Amino acid sequence: MEIKELKARIEAILFTMGEAVELTRIAEAVEHDADTVRKVIRSMMDDYDDESRGIKIIELDGSFQLCTKAEMYESLIRIAHVPKKHVLTDVLLETLSIVAYKQPITRQEIEAIRGVKCDHAVNKLIEYNLICEVGRLDAPGRPLVFGTTEDFLRSFGIQSLEDLPAVSPEKVEDFKLEAEEEVQLTLDI
């Protein structure tokens, strides 16, 4: 099979699926090995990078997706009904950060870290499809366990959880000191 035909088949798969497709599934569909398919997709990504193109291919944790470039959004809103953009409040961002860095994590563990109930925040993040239930903990009551979704990766422009920024040891110490001060203030009251 010629490279042009292979690119066309991959493009058709990504366009038709409309969501991220695992590399191995693409390779099986086009009957080529994963390394060759990855190289072809990377070449396609370079082709789509040209400013004359309105779409691009993104990688999400070993999967690939065809999507519209962000610069094209203004033109799209003139023709399509765009779903409401979700606003992430400080509470939602804090809860999402905890899930992203500590996943898989239970609601009770999130509450222990935040120090307050998190039902509303967790429910909103599920509604926004940024987190989802990933299973149940093997413990009494079998509590739900949460993790991030592909939409989380897509929304924050990262390919995998390994791309999350590392928290410096100094920052961790600052957080510990702040938490201890808050506990002391609570005890003083």
Image (cartoon, rainbow, N blue to C red):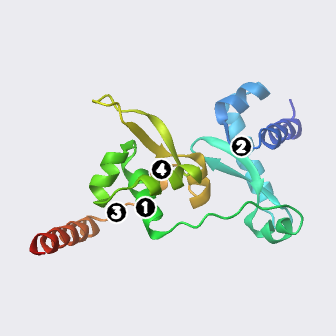
**Image quadrant where residue 70 sits:** bottom right
Q: Which mark is residue 167?
A: 3
Q: Which mark is residue 19?
A: 2
From mark 2 to mark 4, how far is it between C-alphas?
18 Å
Looking at the image, is mark 2 or mark 3 earlier in the sequence?
A: 2
From mark 3 to mark 1, how far is it between C-alphas?
6 Å
Determine the residue located farthest toward the left in the rendered image: 188
> Which one is closest to the eye, mark 2 or mark 4?
2
> Which one is closest to the eye, mark 2 or mark 3?
2
Q: Amino acid at mark 4?
A: Leu
Q: Which mark is residue 165?
A: 1
Which percent across, then down, holds residue 127?
58, 51
Q: Are marks 4 and 1 in contact (CB under 8 Å)?
A: no
Which percent across, then down, holds residue 10?
80, 38
**Which residue is at 16% across, 71% downward?**
186
Label 3: which secondary element: loop
Q: Which mark is residue 161?
A: 4
Q: Amino acid at mark 1?
A: Pro
Looking at the image, is mark 2 or mark 4 earlier in the sequence?
A: 2
Q: Is residue 98 above or below residue 140?
A: below
Which percent across, then down, holds residue 181?
16, 73
From mark 4 to mark 3, how far is it between C-alphas?
13 Å
**Which residue is at 77% across, 49% downward?**
44
Q: Quadrant of the C terminus?
A: bottom left
Local packing at callout 3 (Cα closer than 10 Å; few below 14, some 14-19, many 20+) is few
